[in-house]
Amino acid sequence: MTGSRRRRQTIRSATAELLGDLGPTPVDVASRLHSAGVQGIPRSGTSCAIARYLHAVMAADPQVQGVMVNCEGVTVSVRRWWSPDILVLVPAAVRQFIRQFDSGDFSELVANQNREPQA
């Protein structure tokens, strides 16, 4: 396995582990995000609570450029132009959380969009 392939597999595994560690139910996922101080914008692939959580944890990796989330999976963009994005399927609990968050549940996790961004 080449170094690039190994690195992509490491990023894929780390992302899957982070998603799995959020909990077995949507309420557990919300609780974990709330206790970590994460808030997000519903229906935003790059600013929802899950995307912000993953970005905060994964931003220290110099290979990771960005994260985009939808109900089916997480797309991790890497900094190498020749390397395709990494797709990681989300566990059922996270998928359910995303759907509920996007439809207005878990209001304590909704970021105030009128507030100035914090540095």
Image (cartoon, helix red, strand yellow):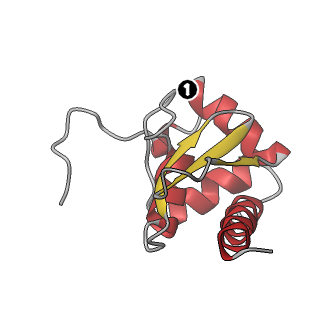
> The N terminus is located in which quarter?
bottom right
Compared with 83, 18 (above or below) is below
Residue at 46% in and 40% down = 46
Q: Tell me residue 48's x, y (percent).
A: 49, 40
Residue at 21% in and 32% down = 114
> The C terminus is located in which quarter?
bottom left
Q: Residues within 10 Å of mark 1 (few under 14, many from 20)?
A: few
Viewer-proximal residue, 102 or 107? 102
* 64 on left or right of 4: left
Viewer-proximal residue, 87 or 108? 87
Q: Tell me residue 104's x, y (percent).
A: 55, 26
Q: Mark 1 points at which residue?
A: 104
Residue at 52% in and 26% down = 43
Viewer-proximal residue, 5 or 31? 5
Image quarter for residue 29? bottom right
Per the image, label 1 sits on a secondary structure element best described as: loop
Tell me if I can see residue 80 in this picture.
Answer: yes
* 59 on left or right of 27: left
Tell me if I can see residue 36 in this picture.
Answer: no
Image quarter for residue 92? top right
* 54 on left or right of 30: left
Q: Tell me residue 5's x, y (percent).
A: 72, 67
Amino acid on which the number 1 mark rests in the picture: Gly
Viewer-proximal residue, 72 or 77? 77
Q: How many marks?
A: 1
Q: Tell me residue 31's x, y (percent).
A: 62, 57
